[in-house]
Amino acid sequence: MDRFSCTALFAWTICLSAAITANALAAEEKSSTGLGDRGTLTELRVEPNFDGKGFTINGRDRRQQLFVTGLYSSGQEHDLTRQVKYTAAPEGIIAITEDGYVTPIADGEVTITATT
């Protein structure tokens, strides 16, 4: 599992990480019609991730939409934003929806993990 470290400069600093679980790999190895076989899911790319340091949300009224791209052994890239599961640690700093919409709740630093 890749983890990105970050330093809290302002109210909410978000670190991003992505993990691929073995069970999900089999489910994602489906063929796409028209594009050929996707191959094996090899990596998840979570964005925004500025310079590998995540991102910062400044202000209680700010929000951030995450985007998750699955990179496959065939070279194909597919949007998995609504197919991954998001978790945040520690809890209570942000709220994150099923589709990757991040809302700050309290000051602090948090690591968001996206898993398939």
Image (tube, grey):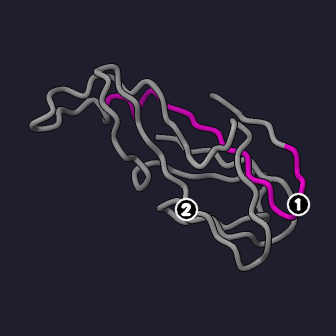
Q: Residue at x 35, y 26 (%)?
A: 72
Give x and y (percent) for residue 102: 62, 64
Q: Residue furthest left?
A: 34
Dot 1 corresponds to which residue?
A: 10
Image quadrant holding the N terminus, namely: top right
Dot placed on the residue nearer the N-terminal end, 2 or 1: 1
Q: Distance of mark 2 from mark 1, alpha carbons?
A: 19 Å
Give x and y (percent) for residue 10: 88, 60
Q: Residues within 10 Å of mark 2 (few under 14, many from 20)?
A: some
Q: How many marks?
A: 2
Depicted 53 relative to depicted 29: above or below? below
Span colored in magenta:
7-26
Dot 2 corresponds to which residue?
A: 65
Give x and y (percent) for residue 53: 74, 40
Q: Observer-nearest residue: 92 or 68?
A: 68
Kind of residue at badge 2: Gln
Q: Residue at x 44, y 52 (%)?
A: 81
Residue 47: mark in rendering: none
Is residue 73 rendered to the left or right of residue 103?
Answer: left
